[in-house]
Amino acid sequence: DAGVTQSPTHLIKTRGQQVTLRCSPKSGHDTVSWYQQALGQGPQFIFQYYEEEERQRGNFPDRFSGHQFPNYSSELNVNALLLGDSALYLCASSLTGLFGELFFGEGSRLTVL
Amino acid sequence: RKEVEQDPGPFNVPEGATVAFNCTYSNSASQSFFWYRQDCRKEPKLLMSVYSSGNEDGRFTAQLNRASQYISLLIRDSKLSDSATYLCVVNMRPQGGSEKLVFGKGTKLTVNP
């Protein structure tokens, strides 16, 4: 039973560029959430997708956008990258109704130069 | 006041010790609580869910005090493998808003031989 998979695992971008991160949820899970984790901090909620729609959003600017596909996989897009966007981006999947019981992927570590 | 605050740590304890972490939350309407464990440079993993006054799983005990708005995690007979960062997570429902998971910054534990 595959868990949550994310790609790429590491990437380096320069300021102003755009990045797309991908996530496949755990088998049987229908809800995908994205988190940003800076060094030494807890994960910060970006947004959550369910049934291909953004259901909730945290305090992140519109430069952060996402998508969920019919097979429940998801993408996170960040435009006009800033140095402060450097972080570990974590995807988590869950079942509807078990909101707090998240299964995380290993994350995509983004460095913006 | 931060939504979720944890002991800043770090905690350094010898094997076999008992250690407790505290976490306070700001939203009295919060309904569910979780402890996650995160190993260095790895993804968070669910350790325990706390839906009522507390929960016990082997050496781990989580307690909830709704009146004082805090959750604690007690680890008995610490093992070297318990070394990790422990994240307190609260499922909040802000007034007029939808529920959201808020992570604390985490408390780092090192168990020494």
Image (cartoon, rainbow, N blue to C red):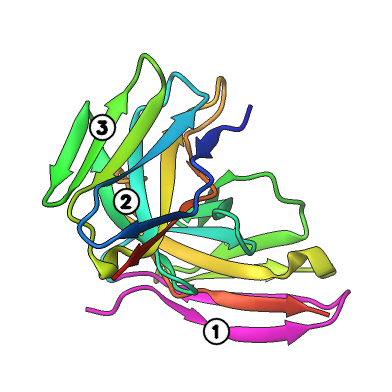
User: Is B34 placed above or below A6 here?
Assistant: above
Q: Which residue is mark 1?
A: A9
The answer for which chain carries disc 2 is A
Q: Residue B5, how many percent across, how many down? A: 53, 36
The residue type indicated by label 3 comes to: Gln
The magenta stretch is A1-26
Please state, as top left, top right, bottom left or bottom right, where the C terminus of chain B lies in the image: bottom left
Q: Is residue B50 left or right of residue B45?
A: left
Q: Residues within 10 Å of mark 1 (few under 14, many from 20)?
A: some
Residue A48 visible here: yes
Residue in the picture at 76% in, 54% down: A62
Between the C-alphas of marks 3 and 1, the distance is: 36 Å
Q: Residues within 10 Å of mark 2 (few under 14, many from 20)?
A: many
Nearer the observer: mark 3 or 1; the answer is 3
* Quarter of the image that includes the N terminus of chain B: top right
The residue at which mark 2 appears reads as A101
Foreground disc of the pair 3, 2: 3
